Image: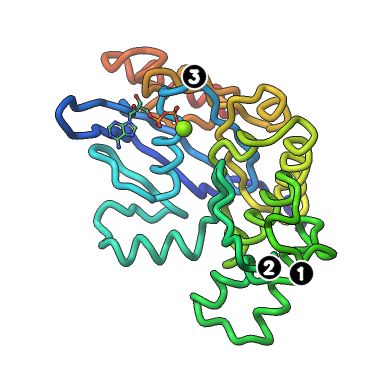
Amino acid sequence: MITMAKQTESVLKLERVSKLYDGATPFLALDEVSLEIMKGELVSIIGPSGSGKSTLLHMLGCLDRPTGGEIFVGGKEISKMGDDEIADVRRDTIGFVFQSFNLASTLSVFKNVELPLMISNMPKAERQKVVARNLQLVGLTDKAGNLPSQLSGGQKQRVAIARALANSPKILLADEPTGNLDSRSSKEIIDNMVRLCREEGITVIIVTHDPNIAERTDRMVRIMDGKIESDTDESKRSRKGTVSMLYGKADEGAGKKEARRREK
Ligand SMILES: Nc1ncnc2c1ncn2[C@@H]1O[C@H](COP(=O)(O)OP(=O)(O)O)[C@@H](O)[C@H]1O
Ligand SMILES: [Mg+2]
């Protein structure tokens, strides 16, 4: 019997995740956010400045611990893990791209992409292959010997993407990756991320201000004051979050029925 492989593998899941920044004036940056991302999705997170996008991405990327709720990476809940174990999960699963490219200015493109592989003690011969492949994936094979200063903004960001692919991550998280780029370079970056998703099967999540970028993704999650205001793929909102949002906590029964109906 032949069965079609269905993309129903959950790669990241937040269950009522909150983040309270403590300090002189404590600030609740995320307020019980529930969100599930499936393997191979191409998702944008949008919302005004200060709405909690970066905080949400930090939670998804296990860069910071939540002050409430649970985070699952590939089905494993991370809150009971120690910092080292979380760092291992992060290194093996997730690649990060930021607005500022953070390239080492004195190292060539090749060396920049090689650096994380050296840190993880990959043998030299293997490193060379992986660097060559990752540069090819971002279309920069011919710039391997250049210094970052000899590249356009879009090319610099593509080096950062190649570097983020070091450990063959299943998930690529990008925080305003086109924030410092003109529209042509921005297109270059989103084209690349779409290709990594479609052709390499990488799950891609992009925080962006730019409607042209968000439009290119399959799913838009809008955040406002630390809460998810809308999600174009409502069926993939975590059950609990969806239920309490749509019906209030008192009527979860009706909510579950509705959620089952949506699944059909
Ligand atoms: N380390 C921090 N300490 C205190 N408040 C913070 C910290 N980081 C972010 N915030 C606050 O949390 C809110 C959300 O921030 P952020 O997630 O960076 O928003 P966005 O990325 O959507 O602009 C903002 O009001 C911001 O000032
Ligand atoms: Mg931000």
Query: In the rendering, at what x and y percent does residue 110 appear?
Result: 70, 70
Residue 33 spot, x, y in % from top left? 37, 29
Disc 1/disc 2 C-alpha distance (Å):
6 Å
Measured Cα–Cα span from mark 2 to mark 3: 36 Å
Which of the two labelled residues, at mark 2 and mark 3, occupies the earlier sequence position? 3
Q: List x then y, in percent, for residue 193.
A: 71, 45
Mark yes or no: residue 105 visible.
yes
The quarter of the picture where the C terminus appears is top right
At a point 65% along the width and 39% down the height, the residue shown is 42
Q: Amino acid at mark 2?
A: Ser
In the image, 146: left or right of 41? Answer: right
Which residue is depicted at the point 39% across and 50% down? 62
Q: Nearer the viewer, residue 159 or 95?
A: 159
Residues marked 1 and 2 touching at CB (< 8 Å): yes
* Kind of element beneath mark 2: loop
Mark whose residue sits in front, 1 or 3: 1
Q: Residue type at mark 1?
A: Gly
Local crowd size for mark 2, using a 10 Å CA cut-off: few (<14), some (14–19), many (≥20): some
Q: Which mark is residue 48?
A: 3
Calculate the distance from the C-alpha at mark 1 to the C-alpha at mark 3. Answer: 39 Å
Q: Amino acid at mark 3?
A: Pro
- In the displayed structure image, the side of residue 145 where residue 248 appears, left or right: left
**What's the mark number on residue 145?**
1
Q: Based on the displayed image, in which of its 4 quarters is residue 219 positioned?
A: top right
Earlier-in-chain disc, 1 versus 2: 2
